[in-house]
């Protein structure tokens, strides 16, 4: 049975139709990704499902067993509340009942009445039935299960990391008993480790979920269906994000071909009609009328392909070729207020390499970039750039933009040699058309500001780009446009990113930043994961080997028990081998008997028994050899020490 379904759902704001005709079902184990360009109505759909917005048409059907859990983009609005108190808000009704019960107790103690006592009994029964006595314990247990310590539970939300805030929201949804999660950009502001934790959590989740995300790697790993919002309606696809993209491209190509072929056929028939009417004979007129009916029928069934959402198509040119050695960093260390952020960092980048810098939030990736740029002064170490280096920098915080300027002036003031036509043409490439170029930068969305920064970077023609989280704020289409531009870039790339799809596409090497240095890994993100797992397994094995042997007496007793079992089995194997040798001799004697020469069936039966005995004997001999060696090694003098 479906947990949720919608039928011809519609939603508008004023004259703007956000979506219409939206129909779908969510089954009990569905993992669904909801994608679409920024502003296509994804969050609006979620808020319509939860009841925050009222639909203008259509219906929403929810099973009686369905409990919705909604994780918004901007979570935990009260930053002064402790993590524990934030999770307890899911039990606000129980806490209110508890407060009323305390007030009733005080009133009854002062002035007892039958009415007050009756109200107390009813409320107390309801409180117990709904789990009021255990709600605090359940809240603490959920936080412990998600990795919170008692100390972290007492910290205010404002000091928690993005990953910890996401875990708070998940704890609240779990405690609410939700079996259908609506997740709106849950990976925003999470580092890679937190995103991977969230993936593992959702993979083991017993219920269903719909997730809005621009993280293509995340969608590929989790989702079995994709819903796309676009042009005011929703289209469903089977498979993960990669499968969706293939199906969509194929469907659009097929629709365009069908449209072009039909248009071509209509044009051909119209030319025939023109010629037939030019002849102006009765027979040709009848044929022309017949053709016109056929044309009308084709036109009535003609489906015009939906206009593709306008996307960016650009490249990063370089003004000059750099030297082979682009960057060399030796023993770099950085400290803030006496606390060492990182040290012993060695880096080496060569021309045309695509290198990524990864690490958990707070490890100093952005600070390392700013040290390379000279904005921070290192505690120790050397930074050396190669010959003919033109450096370009993309700041994830977008601090390089002037909020008071218009979009056109932001570009023109940086490149005053360009004409207005050239500036406006460049802005058009990054989807700023008409009056959009005169908007103040302060009025732009995060994605629009990101496009302005990327345009500035493109016009710089730098041959060495330092990019700090360049896909933050970008929708999937814009991320793919950036990805294509970086793939064709002839310069050198050094990128901080948690976009694993981008890393997989581009990375030649990856540096993993730690407080003690930067570890280099060759290859893509998937290769990096494999190397890290292998290294961790090796380290764990080494640690186990280095650990002092404990409980020597118990170990010796266990070894002696194993030895006794091995010796017992060895004796049984030897006895069985002797039995099989006797059986083999008997069977051979029987087969040699002349009386069996004419009894084919009996001979075949004895032959099969002989073959079975030989196979068992061979297997037992192998086992005897292994057991003998094991017993010998266990009883050797060195084993007793």
Image (cartoon, rainbow, N blue to C red):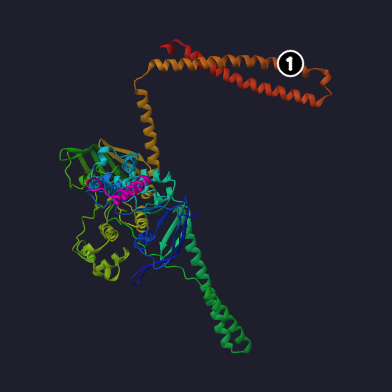
Q: Position of residue 31 (x, y in %)?
A: 44, 51
Q: Is residue 112 magenta?
A: yes
On the image, the x and y values in percent for residue 605 come to 76, 25
Residue 531 shown in magenta = no
In this image, 547 relative to 382: left or right?
right
Frontmost residue, 533 versus 141: 141
The image position of residue 414, as x and y in percent, is: 20, 61
Classified by dominant secondary structure, the portion drawn in magenta counts as: helix
Residue at the disc numbered 1: 586
Report if residue 497 is visible in the image: no
Nearer to us in this view, 622 or 376: 622
**516 shown above or below 1:** above
Q: Position of residue 56 (x, y in %)?
A: 39, 68
Q: Is residue 338 above or below residue 253?
A: above
Asked whether residue 490 is in view, the answer is yes
Please tell me which residue is depicted at 34% across the width and 72% down the height of the picture.
Answer: 15
Q: Residues within 10 Å of mark 1 (few under 14, many from 20)?
A: few
Which range of residues does the magenta coloring cover?
108-130
**Side of 544 relative to 588 (left or right):** left
- Which residue appears farthest toward the left when viewing the image? 337
Count every numbered label the image shows and give the total. 1
Q: Which corner quadrant holds the C terminus?
A: top left
Above-or-below relation of 230 to 467: below
The one nearer the camera, 415 or 182, is 182
Helix, strand or loop for disc 1: helix
């Amino acid at each position: 049975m479906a947990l949720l379904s919608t039928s011809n759902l519609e939603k508008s704001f004023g004259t703007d139709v956000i979506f219409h005709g939206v129909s779908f079902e969510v089954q009990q184990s569905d993992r669904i990704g909801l994608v679409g360009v920024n502003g296509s109505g994804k969050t609006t759909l979620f808020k319509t499902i939860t009841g925050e917005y009222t639909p203008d048409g259509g219906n929403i059907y929810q099973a009686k067993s369905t409990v919705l859990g909604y994780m918004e983009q901007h979570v935990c609005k009260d930053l002064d509340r402790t993590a524990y108190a934030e999770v307890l808000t899911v039990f606000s009704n129980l806490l209110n009942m508890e407060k009323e019960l305390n007030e009733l107790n005080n009133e009854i103690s002062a002035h007892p009445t039958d009415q007050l006592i009756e109200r107390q009994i009813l409320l107390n029964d309801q409180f117990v039935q709904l789990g009021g006595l255990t709600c605090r314990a359940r809240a603490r247990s959920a936080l412990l299960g998600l990795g919170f310590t008692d100390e972290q539970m007492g910290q205010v939300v404002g000091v928690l990391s993005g990953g910890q805030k996401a875990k708070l929201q998940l704890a609240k949804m779990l405690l609410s008993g939700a079996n259908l999660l609506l997740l709106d950009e849950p990976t925003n502001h999470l580092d890679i480790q937190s995103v991977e934790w969230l993936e593992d959590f959702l993979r083991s989740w017993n219920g269903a979920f719909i997730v809005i995300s621009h993280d293509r790697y995340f969608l590929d790993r989790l989702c079995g269906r994709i819903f796309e919002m676009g042009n005011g309606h929703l289209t469903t696809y089977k498979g993960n994000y990669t499968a969706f993209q293939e199906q969509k491209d194929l469907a659009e190509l097929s629709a365009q071909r069908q449209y072009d072929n039909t248009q071509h056929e209509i044009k051909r028939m119209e030319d025939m009609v023109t010629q037939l009417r030019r002849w102006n004979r009765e027979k040709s007129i009848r044929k022309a009328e017949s053709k016109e009916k056929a044309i009308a029928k084709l036109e009535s069934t003609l489906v015009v392909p939906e206009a593709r959402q306008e996307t960016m198509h650009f490249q990063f040119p370089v003004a000059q070729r750099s030297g082979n050695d682009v960057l060399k960093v030796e023993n770099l260390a950085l400290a803030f207020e006496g606390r060492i952020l990182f040290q012993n960092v060695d880096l080496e980048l060569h021309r045309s390499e695509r290198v990524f810098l990864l690490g958990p939030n707070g490890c100093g990736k952005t600070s390392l970039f700013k040290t390379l740029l000279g904005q921070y002064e290192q505690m120790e170490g050397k930074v050396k750039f190669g010959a003919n280096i033109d450096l370009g920098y993309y700041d994830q915080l977008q601090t390089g933009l002037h909020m008071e300027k218009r979009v056109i002036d932001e570009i023109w003031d940086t490149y005053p040699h360009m004409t207005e036509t050239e500036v406006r043409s460049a802005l058009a490439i990054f989807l700023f058309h008409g009056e959009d170029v005169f908007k103040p930068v302060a009025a732009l969305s995060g994605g629009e500001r990101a496009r302005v920064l990327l345009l500035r970077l493109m016009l710089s023609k730098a041959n060495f780009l330092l990019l700090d989280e360049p896909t933050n704020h970008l929708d999937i289409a814009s991320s793919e446009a950036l990805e294509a531009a970086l793939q064709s870039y002839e310069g050198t790339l050094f990128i901080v990113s948690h976009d694993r799809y981008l890393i997989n596409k581009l990375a030649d090497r990856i540096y993993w930043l730690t407080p003690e240095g930067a570890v280099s890994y060759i290859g893509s993100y998937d290769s990096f994961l494999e190397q890290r797992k292998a290294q961790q397994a090796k380290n764990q094995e080494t640690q186990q080997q280095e650990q002092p042997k404990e409980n020597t007496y118990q170990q010796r007793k266990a070894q002696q028990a194993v030895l006794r079992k091995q010796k017992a089995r060895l004796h049984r194997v030897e006895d069985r081998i002797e039995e099989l040798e006797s059986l083999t001799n008997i069977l051979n004697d029987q087969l040699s008997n002349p009386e069996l020469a004419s009894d084919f069936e009996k001979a075949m039966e004895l032959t099969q028994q002989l073959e079975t005995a030989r196979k068992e004997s061979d297997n037992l001999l192998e086992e005897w050899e292994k057991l003998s060696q094991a017993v010998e090694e266990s009883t050797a003098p060195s084993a007793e020490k």
